[in-house]
Image (cartoon, helix red, strand yellow):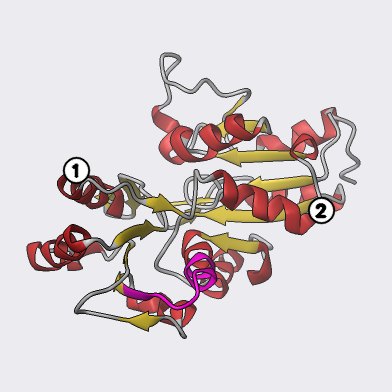
Amino acid sequence: MKIKALLLDIDGTMVFKGHAIPGAAEAIEAARMAGLQLRFLTNITGQLPSTIAEDLQRHGINVRAEEIHTASTSCARYLKSLGDVSCFFLMPESVNSMFEGIARDHVSPDVVVIGDIGESFDYACLNQAFGYLHKGARLVVPHKNLFWFDPRGVRLDCGAFILGLEAASGKQALVTGKPSPVFFTSVMDSLGVKPSQTMIIGDDLLTDIAAAQHLEVAHALVLTGKGASYTESDVPRPERLWPSIAELSRFLAQSGHNTD
């Protein structure tokens, strides 16, 4: 199979719990030597692409900020496309700059926007968001991941709270990040590649692999990060199972890509 572009997950695929996945840096260099276009798609909501790129570079992984697409950047782009709307944000302050120019309303917003604010989630802010939804506001979220990992261990993610708000309000959240097909197709369109020329690699069945299968894109589940708990009874069933991203180098060589 000859591919032209790779869409790669970051947390759990390139790095995990503050450490680089062994072989990740070499895999990225092999992909660049093969002439592939690379984009890194992540549901990380609390960091700017430039911050994520700096962190990856500290781990020896050669990634540029412009190659990173986050669920938050996608969310900001979507909200700005709506035109004159007002929003109530429960988003990390670290990404406030992404949402500059969007009206903020704590009285009667058109849209409620919720990302991962970690330990700042409490009854007061969630009930405030629920009140706006009950009055008719729409719910827009970067993603609905239920949990993630950091050096301390497993942590609740914003999806756990979003599901509760959906149930209480009867509103279905519009997801702008993974596994939204639009998130992936917009990146492929920007690269000028078709699904048949693309491969998605990640550690999450419900975001990376589900999206790949929906779009009929070649894909691989890495058995690191969330993928470490994969069992054969899990669904969806991935097309390829790799021990880690380090397998990418061998895959490219076997599929006829020159990585020398």
- Image side of residue 122 versus residue 74, left or right: left
- Image side of residue 99 versus residue 258, left or right: left
Where in the figure is residue 131, as x and y percent of width and height? 14, 63
Residue 84 on the magenta segment: yes
Residue occupied by mark 2: 192
The kind of residue on which mark 1 rests is Ala
Q: Residue at x 74, y 59 (%)?
A: 190
Callout 1 secondary element: helix
Q: Residue at x 8, y 67 (%)?
A: 124
Q: Decide if residue 181 is in sight here.
A: yes
Q: Which residues are magenta?
A: 76-87
> Dot 1, how many residues are within 10 Å of its Cα: few (below 14), some (14-19), or many (20+)?
few
Residue occupied by mark 1: 167
Callout 2 secondary element: loop
- Image side of residue 253 versus residue 162, left or right: right
Mark nearest the camera among 2 and 1 is: 1
Residue 247 versus residue 1: which sits nearer the camera?
1
